[in-house]
Amino acid sequence: MTNLELARRFYEIASLLEVRGESVFRIRAYQRAAQTLEALGEDVAAVAARGGLRRLPGVGRDLAARIEEYLATGRLAQLETLRAGLPATFLGLLEIRGLGPRTARALWEQLGIDSVEALEEACRSGRILGVAGIREKSRTNIVQAIERWRAGQARTPLARALAVARHLVETLRARGDVDRIEIAGSLRRMRETVKDVDLLVTSRAPARVLETFVTLPSVAAVTARGPTRVSVRHQAGLAVDLRVVEPEAFGAALQYFTGSREHNVRTREIASRRGRRLSEYGVFDERTGQRVAGLTEEDVYAAIGLPWIPPELRENQGEIEAAREGALPSLVTVEDLRGDLHAHTDWSDGRLTLERMVAAAEARGYEYVIVSDHSASLAIAHGLDVERLRAQAREIRALQARTRIRILAGTECDILEDGRLDFPDEVLAGLDVVLAAVHSRFKQSRADMTARIVRALANPWVNVLVHPTGRRLGTREPYDVDLEAVLAAAREHGKAVEINGSPERLDLADVHARRAAALGVPVAISSDTHALAEFEHVALGVAVARRAWLTPAHVLNTRPLDGLRAWSRPAGRAATG
Ligand SMILES: [Zn+2]
Ligand SMILES: [Zn+2]
């Protein structure tokens, strides 16, 4: 059990470093190492004995030394130092969404708040006001967050829930005893936020699987426990349900627990009209009571006369009808994308140099990538003025000479308050692709915001309206805009709109992307990458696109380079070569 004990301690160090405001890189390093240990099949002592610690993912020289210290002494001096002066219940405060480690620490230091109960009391009495900048509004937010925490109801953004679920799947697989394991629920349907994580497994040793699960270091508390099911609160702040089902019913259980409820109401009706009963245990003949399907989802759907339906579509939004008519869409996949149309470099607020950004895109196998740094009026992001944009264009040309992937010169150009663009037309005309975005004055009236964006879309050199509603999941509402008018303008002027795959944006949302496609407006699926790992965010954008019923034909960046360029700079309108 050394692996788990050590993982638990590393998680705790990460949390304590967070409380002390340490660098995010150190915090992540401990979290990564903890995850590695949790999923490690071999005893870490054995790994250490053969000198293999530093080959473990996420374990460098420092962390290898910590592991050796623990193996030799059973202690971690660093953890003891970090714990000093903080009560054991304190870390529970970090599970309250929106409180933040620094505020939690200030509350402890100034008011002695050391637990969720104490926090609640301080909110009720008003003692909390004035501490760490907390005002009436934040007090209300904290009270609501505590209520949601109690009810286990806080919704978690897709990316965060996926990371938790995938880690648990990997861990349970590595620890043995599971035969099949799948993520079900709204997470499998890739909803933009989820209430909890549902995992289904088959196993010849169900009791052992459940026991392994509840003792994982990343599990904060067990909230319910039965012979084939446990519910826990994960330390990332969301509920996780694990169910062990019989292998013959795995497909039926997967179908049932994937939902949605509305979709399942329809499938049960269809089954019953065929003299069959559909449940989490299988499809049964109503007359004989015999199970006719259950092993796989394909079998289950086939037994009620339907083709298999992709989980992202299971919302009772027309998928049943489409399935019956043999008209289910062939949904876009990550592999269909030929390039990324939204990427930043360290010329503005990205972390990669131009060269490294382009190399990373090339390593993904893309045919093209855009360079779309911010424009000057976004000073906070070191936006480029005309002169720096020209200097960047020269660097792009030089780099292109020694690069296979096609580098498209672009910009993420600010749409100014009145709908003008931040660069003059002759500058925009010299670029391959122009993205336009609202980054300021979010509080304009609906009429003004709509007119502002519609005017920008009428500019002949603008190609893609990016993150069209400006929302940030859980922290910023979309600005007030008549999206229908915006999409109509995009169609009229031959412009595209974006699904921004950045985890906190996912903008456009699925319903709006579906509407865009229905109107014939092309949709770009972009990462909006600011760092190496963020290229991966296109996968989240693709998830939204699939929920929006998009096929490759709807998506702008599935087009080959020639097709893309013919669209963005049609012959006769090209300004430069
Ligand atoms: Zn932006
Ligand atoms: Zn951007």
Image (cartoon, rainbow, N blue to C red):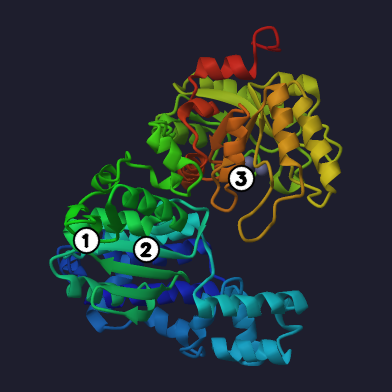
Comparing labels 3 and 2, the label whose residue is closer to the camera? 2
Above or below, comparing residue 238 to residue 274 in the picture:
below
**Tag 3 residue:** 507
Mark 1 lies on a secondary structure that is helix
Mark 3 lies on a secondary structure that is loop
Choose top left, top right, bottom left or bottom right for residue 304: top left
**Tag 1 residue:** 174
User: Residue 69: x, y in percent?
Assistant: 28, 76
Q: Amino acid at mark 3?
A: Asp
Comparing labels 1 and 3, the label whose residue is closer to the camera? 3
**Residue sitting at x 32%, y 62%:** 199
Q: Give the camera-side residue of 381 and 114.
A: 114
User: Residue 245: x, y in percent?
Assistant: 23, 64
Mark 2 lies on a secondary structure that is strand
Quarter of the figure with the N terminus:
bottom left
Crowding at mark 2 (Cα within 10 Å: few <14, some 14-19, many 20+)? many
Q: Earlier in the sequence, mark 2 or mark 1?
A: 1
Q: Earlier in the sequence, mark 1 or mark 3?
A: 1
Q: Give the camera-side residue of 309 and 390.
A: 309
Q: Are marks 2 and 1 in contact (CB under 8 Å)?
A: no
Above or below, comparing residue 123 to residue 352 in the picture:
below
Is the CB atom of the residue marked by disc 3 within 8 angstroms of ligand 1's nearest atom?
no
Q: Which mark is residue 198?
A: 2
